[in-house]
Amino acid sequence: MRWKLTSRPEPSARFVADVEPSKPPACAEEDQLRVTLINHSTVLLQQPGSHILTDPIWSERASPLAAIGPRRHREPGVRWDDLPRIDTVLLSHNHYDHLDLATLRRLADRGQSQFIVPAGVGRLLRSRNIGPVQELDWGESVTLGQTIIHAVPALHFSARGVFDRNLTLWCGYVLEAAESIVYFAGDTAFGNHFARIRERFGAPRLALLPIGAYQPRWFMSSVHMAPDEAVRAHEILAARTSIAIHHGTFQLADESIDAPRRSLLACARDDSFLVLDNGQSVILHK
């Protein structure tokens, strides 16, 4: 209530028509990890024999209502009809900008995907006939094909309504495949969990780190990283490459839609922390 009564959001363009949608290939080439930022925290990870999608959202709003709630300022970078086969969907928590039921329903209807969710979230998906679903608690793992998926801690919270706060878990994920480590942080504040993840799994080949929805700091610092904190997390993890997520599509806090990008580019110390446009891909070699 204090935030909403005192909030002074920075102005953003109602809609930014700068997205050039791309069409990912049907599969990745040998010894390659192809990473495509679709929008917000939705990233397509393609390796030979494995296609993974994180926190997918194609809806117009990140909201339970069609006419109210945060509306997208940019289009997805991959059109729905151009989405390749999706083997695994990773959901980090149940907030509307990360768990979009309309999108999940469309993925389930394709009949190709396994859904990996934090403990307690499976009930919501099963109630909508979305599945198959595998729930993981922090520290638990599941093997799908050649990939081991580990649920790891994050500093955040869960809720989809007024009376369900923290009744389900939130998490990040570490993916182990072909001697390569990928870390998807989900939504998280800065904390010592980054050091613990590095100690347990080693330095990631790729880290997907959130940089948006950080203002005002007195309120957001306990649940969201600011860009300079994401740079510190990148350094603590010793990631060979990090890619910024959770920015540029929905304005969820007081900073403007492109402020996270500008701030990260100003404080990043080298080109190992990338800020991609919606639809832009990079190819990483293991």
Image (cartoon, rainbow, N blue to C red):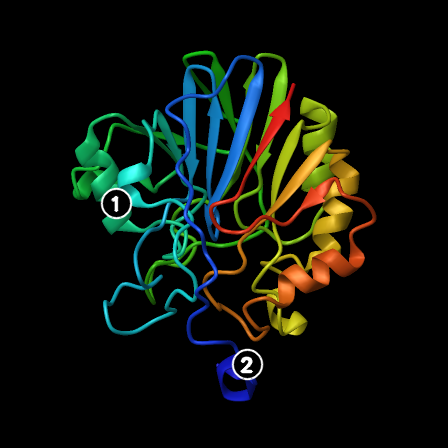
Which residue corresponds to the image point at 63% horizontal and 62% vertical from the top-left? 260
Residue 118 higher or lower than 140, as above or below:
below
Number of other residues with Cα within 10 Å of mark 1, as a class: few under 14, some 14 to 19, many 20 or more: few
Number of other residues with Cα within 10 Å of mark 2, as a class: few under 14, some 14 to 19, many 20 or more: some
Q: Nearer the viewer, residue 35 or 20?
A: 20
First in sequence: mark 2 vs mark 1: 2
Q: Quadrant of the C terminus?
A: top right
Give x and y (percent) for residue 133: 29, 30
Q: Nearer the viewer, residue 13 or 252?
A: 13
Q: Which mark is residue 9?
A: 2
Give x and y (percent) for residue 257: 54, 68
Q: Secondary structure at mark 1?
A: helix
Q: Nearer the viewer, residue 177 or 33?
A: 33
Residue 199 higher or lower than 244, as above or below:
above
Which residue corresponds to the image point at 69% horizontal and 24% vertical from the top-left? 200
Residue 111 higher or lower than 40, as above or below:
above
- What is the spatial separation of the Cα atoms under label 2 and label 1, in whole angstroms? 32 Å
Instruction: Look at the image and tell me whether residue 118 can be seen.
Output: no
Which residue corresponds to the image point at 56% horizontal and 24% vertical from the top-left? 33
Q: Which residue is mark 1?
A: 124
Q: Nearer the viewer, residue 222 or 54?
A: 54
Give x and y (percent) for residue 37: 50, 44
What residue type is disc 1 on? Leu
Residue at the extreme right of the image, as rendered: 269
Which residue corresponds to the image point at 72% horizontal and 33% vertical from the top-left? 239
Give x and y (percent) for residue 272: 74, 39
Residue 6 higher or lower than 87, as above or below:
below
Q: Secondary structure at mark 2?
A: loop
What residue type is disc 2 on? Pro
Instruction: Look at the image and tell me whether residue 41 can be seen.
Output: yes
Q: In the figure, residue 108 lies in which quadrant?
A: top left
